[in-house]
Amino acid sequence: MAQDTTKDLHTDYLDIMIGPSHPATHGTIQMHALLDGETIVDIDVEPGYLHRGFEKECEDHRWNQIVPYTDRLNYVSPIINNVGYVMAVEKLCGLEITPRCQYLRVILSEMCRVTDHLTCLAAVVMELGAFSAFLYFVKARELYYELIESVTGARVTYSWTRVGGLRWDVPDDFREGLRQAIPETRRIVDEIHRLFDKNRIFIDRTAGVGVISKEDAISYGITGPFLRSTGVAYDVRKAHPYLVYNELEFEIPTGENGDNYDRWVVRMAELEQSLRIIEQALAKLPDGPVNVADPRFTLPAKESVYSSIEGTINHFKLIYEGIQVPRGEAYAYVEGANGELGFYVVSDGGTKPVKCRCRPPCFPTVAAMGEILKGYMLADIIPTFGSVNMIGGEMDR
Amino acid sequence: MSVEILDKLKERFPEAIEETHQLCGDETARVARSAWLEAVKFLRDEMGMNMFIDLTAVDYLGRESGLPRFEVVLHLRNNETNQRIRLKARVPESSCSIASLCSLYKGADWFERECHEMYGIKFAGHPDLRPLLLYPEFQGYPLRKDYPIAKTQPRIPLLAPEHKPSRRAMDETEPDELSCEEIKKAN
């Protein structure tokens, strides 16, 4: 009666390729997995499909011409990249930017952090099957896309900063727009909280999955929400305050278990902290110029270019030769949406960098993914990869 | 703040530390290539530099004659005190290699793989120096200054359908010798 049904079962490991363009993941990456049934025995992560020679291109361009390339690193929060890059150059030049510029950089960076977190969380829940929640997130994100479009004229690739200042000040109705957008975001985020925080399916798929220990995360160099989910309260904005973050009140949400659910909780909590920062910075926003009054860095006013020889020459020199950065090296870092985003620049005193290195925040996290995923099920790749929030543009550069 | 670290580093490696500076507030030490691993181990174990931040290289092609061509640049951070340090080592083109830090930091693995494919610097002791962002057939080292920016690569033939990409050697036993039960138990 009892027949041995396992006798003819195929017991070899299954070697499969997931990606580089798989419908259940976002981002172009290949995972070479070795499966025992549905359990992952080993997984080899292979990035590089979006490599386009960012550093090589930088060495062939003038300092301000690099700003558009930094947009394409993390295209979900480009202004944080813009700010990080120009901060490295300004550090090397010893340039002090104006108070209004500092506040505006903080406000727009936090708006980008909100869009980045919303996008990441939207992708996580969509890949777990909750498509309607994805639309909620995107509805909130749209509020910020429209506001940033009103400032920079672009929806995705903003190229908003310049060494020593900004391309544009914000328009007159920007403040009013933000005043309406913030409560609306809170309302949407609250709805999403109610959809997921006690959702059995969601918790089953994420809690206890993709766990990493504190020590491993630090040794890998993981930063950002991924590190904070393990309970390490490292945030560049608090640990090494830059711009005006030391004048603003906010908290660093942390998790305990270092799993996918905690990363969800941390990101959701950070949304609220970013909104708090925006509100405070908006209330304190000083008047004044956004660019330094230094003809070596800032373009002259158009009236001066067309009516005086000094203005014409100044304009010509800055456009034709570009700014000159003193010889030396500097590493500047900001809190990107995924963690510490650093730029290491080396100058020989000329108008182009000798080296412009981007330290991408998701790079160490993706590097750790192979180890994190071992022993979990095939289906666990999806929420884990989602919470890693790999951005192909900055991963592969 | 971390000037103290530079002093301790100099005290511990009086011979090997070639230069220190704090340009723009970044504490930097340049160490002899032979003491690279030891100096990093000292920073990790005794100075608490437990967080791996970044590793890259710079190509100084055509600088003053006699100086080695490459410089490997490492950034580390102490997660308790928030101190940071940049450690550099010069690597000549003729013997283009330096000790790998994989035994000290898990994060070193991919950063060194990237540095190797971009600059051709070998990391002695690295378990797996396959290309990371580039493909195996890529010719040359693209971030070297003598690699022309507009250079194109030859087309590579299509892979046969039965081709299997190489995989890193697994740490444990060969897959075939491990039963399903053992794997599940190990997990």
Image (spheres, rainbow, N blue to C red):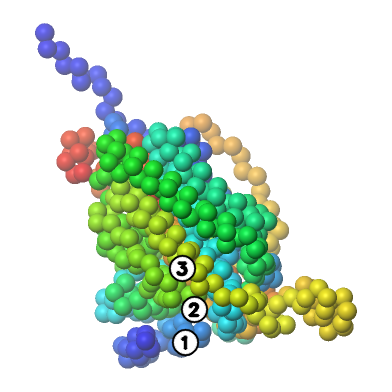
Tag 3 near tag 1, CB within 8 Å = no
Residue A279 in the image: state x and y as whole percent.
47, 64
- Check if mark 2's residue and mark 3's residue have beta carbons within 8 Å: no
What residue is disc 2 on?
B90
Instruction: Give the side of residue A179 with respect to residue B184, left or right.
Output: right
| Residue B12, picture quadrant | bottom left
Near mark 2 (Cα within 10 A), the count class, few <14, some 14-19 or many ≥20, is many
| Residue type beneath disc 2 | Arg
* Chain identity of mark 2: B
Q: Which residue is mark 3?
A: A280
> Mark 3 is on which residue type?
Gln
Q: Are marks 2 and 1 on the same chain?
A: yes
Gap between marks 2 and 1, in whole Å? 18 Å
Give the class, few, some or many, for how many residues have Cα within 10 Å of label 1's Cα (few <14, many ≥20): some
Name the residue carrying label 1.
B22
Comparing marks 3 and 1, which lies closer to the viewer?
Answer: 3
At label 1, which amino acid type do we have? Gln
Cα separation, mark 3 vs mark 1, equals: 34 Å
Q: Can you say whether A192 is above or below A310 in the image?
A: above
Q: Nearer the viewer, mark 2 or mark 1?
A: 1
Q: CA distance from mark 2 to mark 3?
A: 47 Å
Q: Give x and y (percent) for residue A286.
A: 56, 75
> Do pointers 2 and 3 mark residues of a single chain?
no
Q: Is residue A223 above or below residue B179?
A: below
Q: Is residue B29 above or below residue B51?
A: below
